[in-house]
């Protein structure tokens, strides 16, 4: 393999097209039909038969109950055929849309080569390969060879039924048959080295392992197959437990291993993360309901069967030291780390931190989680709407994971939430570090 693997270089037109593509709110109609066909074939009746729909509803209720009880999949959560159908109905559309967005983002960030080899760990019914297929069609060039590993035979059966018809005709895409194996032990004899992308999409939380350290060890084991310029993408649900678990796993994965965090986290003080429990997630516009969701929703408790929210936590890991933000505060810069906010309550200070949430506020107040890797308590940038000004609008223009500078923000402590708030007022300044000579850093 070529020692250098430069990312795809996109033209302005391609970048605009991919940005628009990543925001598409729908699940492809041909894929909807493929899932419906699989369900009908699996149960021996039309997918929209009233009895079949009620059985799927019951399976979704069981799936969600087991998830919130924390039983994971070690006891065979997806072993039942109806459980897999429930997964196809409830989870697949949003997981597909999440990864479709992430593929666009990684490509625009220059993280993926034009011709890539991918491994999807815990592929389920093939959500990641399906999203990659759709992405390659939108990109219009390059190629992808996709390997996948799955432990549940019911998922593999769905994969083999749904993938071939959907990927047919994509000459630049080669999807290898899924490998049935224990996810915690890489099948190195059946997976090539030099992988450009390794994906763990909504799977680490389901491994029947007692600790985040052991989950991190699984990621590190697969990382041995990663190309020097490759990327590991980890996605997890946005709930507190799984979102916080992801950040802990990433810290373990990158500790003394030669791997580094590309994003969304950045560390302007040049140190690793000290945050004990980080709840940070990405939010995208909702997807439209599928026909299957509409049919399942024709019930008194419709909300139980509709899943259109795109909220998820993710992390991108590299081996080559490449980072989204390569800024480190220069020596003598007059900024305070978030770890010392307790000394400055009631004062105005200057800080530099990454935006780690979308706007969590309401019509009257903008609220954003921010982090510089030093604080052990959550820190929020709060800007009342009536304080918006030309000097602080960067806070509203920044994207998730982007680094921001704050000048003249008032420190407050929220005892009820055990968190610090930085009040951004009309006279405060919010800016992008690096746009000024004195804040260029490295």
Image (spheres, grey):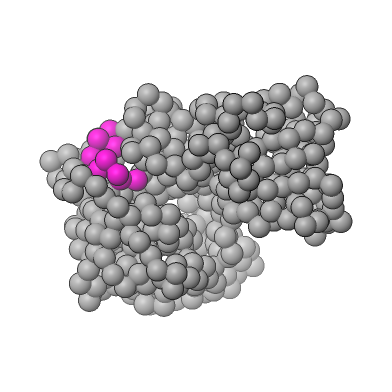
Q: Position of residue 123 (x, y in %)?
A: 32, 52
The answer to which image quadrant residue 41 occupies is bottom left
The answer to which image quadrant residue 104 occupies is bottom left
Determine the residue located farthest toward the top in the rendered image. Answer: 343
Determine the residue located farthest toward the left in the rendered image. Answer: 189
In this view, the residue in front, 276 or 258, is: 258
The vertical placement of 17 against 219, above or below, is: below
The vertical placement of 434 against 258, above or below, is: below
Q: Residue at x 19, y 57 (%)?
A: 177
Could you tell whether 269 is left or right of 414 in the image? left
Q: Residue at x 73, y 55 (%)?
A: 393
Q: Residue at x 20, y 44 (%)?
A: 3
Q: Position of residue 356 (x, y in %)?
A: 60, 44
Could you tell whether 340 is left or right of 372 in the image? right
Is residue 353 in the magenta section? Answer: no
Residue 408 shows in the view: yes
Could you tell whether 142 is left or right of 1 in the image? right
In the image, the segment drawn in magenta is 221-231
Is residue 229 in the magenta section? Answer: yes
The vertical placement of 427 against 50, above or below, is: above
Q: Position of residue 78 (x, y in %)?
A: 37, 50
Determine the residue located farthest toward the front in the rendered image. Answer: 437
Q: Position of residue 183 (x, y in %)?
A: 29, 40
Q: Residue at x 17, y 39 (%)?
A: 188
Residue 56 shows in the view: no
Report how many numbered discs are placed on residues in the image: 0
């Amino acid at each position: 393999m070529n020692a250098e693997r430069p990312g795809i270089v996109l033209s302005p037109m391609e970048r605009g097209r991919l940005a628009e593509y990543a925001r598409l709110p729908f699940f492809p109609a041909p894929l909807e039909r493929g899932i419906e066909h699989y369900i009908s074939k699996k149960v021996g009746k039309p997918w929209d038969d009233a009895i079949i729909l009620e059985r799927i509803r019951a399976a979704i209720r069981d799936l969600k109950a087991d998830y919130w009880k924390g039983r994971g999949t070690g006891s065979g959560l997806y072993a039942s055929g109806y459980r897999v159908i429930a997964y196809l109905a409830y989870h697949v559309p949003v997981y597909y849309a999440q990864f479709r967005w992430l593929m666009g983002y990684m490509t625009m960030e220059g993280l993926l080569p034009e011709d890539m080899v991918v491994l999807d760990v815990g592929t389920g019914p093939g959500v990641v390969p399906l999203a990659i297929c759709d992405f390659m069609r939108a990109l219009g060039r390059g190629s992808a060879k996709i390997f996948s590993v799955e432990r549940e035979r019911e998922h593999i059966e769905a994969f083999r039924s749904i993938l071939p018809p959907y990927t047919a005709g994509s000459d630049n895409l080669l999807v290898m048959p899924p490998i049935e194996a224990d996810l915690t032990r890489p099948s190195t004899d059946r997976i090539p080295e030099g992988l450009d992308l390794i994906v763990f999409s909504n799977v680490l939380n389901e491994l029947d392992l007692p600790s985040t350290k052991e989950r991190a060890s699984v990621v590190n084991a697969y990382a041995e197959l990663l190309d020097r310029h490759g990327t590991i993408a980890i996605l997890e649900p946005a709930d507190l437990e799984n979102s916080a678990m992801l950040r802990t796993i990433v810290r373990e994965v990158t500790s003394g291993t030669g791997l580094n965090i590309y994003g969304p986290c950045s560390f302007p003080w040049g140190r690793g993360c000290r945050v004990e429990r980080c709840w940070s997630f990405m939010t995208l516009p909702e997807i439209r309901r599928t026909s299957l969701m509409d049919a399942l929703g024709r019930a008194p408790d419709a909300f139980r069967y509709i899943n259109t929210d795109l909220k998820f936590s993710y992390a991108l890991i590299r081996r080559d030291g490449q980072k989204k933000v390569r800024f480190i505060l220069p020596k003598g810069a007059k900024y305070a780390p978030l770890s010392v906010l307790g000394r400055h309550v009631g004062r105005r200070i200057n800080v530099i931190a990454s935006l780690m949430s979308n706007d969590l506020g309401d019509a009257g107040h903008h609220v954003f989680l921010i982090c510089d890797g030093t604080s052990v308590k959550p820190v929020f940038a709060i800007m009342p709407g009536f304080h918006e000004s030309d000097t602080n609008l960067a806070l509203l223009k920044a994207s998730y994971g982007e680094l921001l500078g704050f000048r003249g923000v008032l420190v407050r402590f929220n005892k009820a939430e055990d968190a610090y708030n930085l009040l951004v007022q009309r006279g405060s300044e919010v800016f992008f570090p690096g746009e000024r000579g004195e804040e260029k850093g490295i």
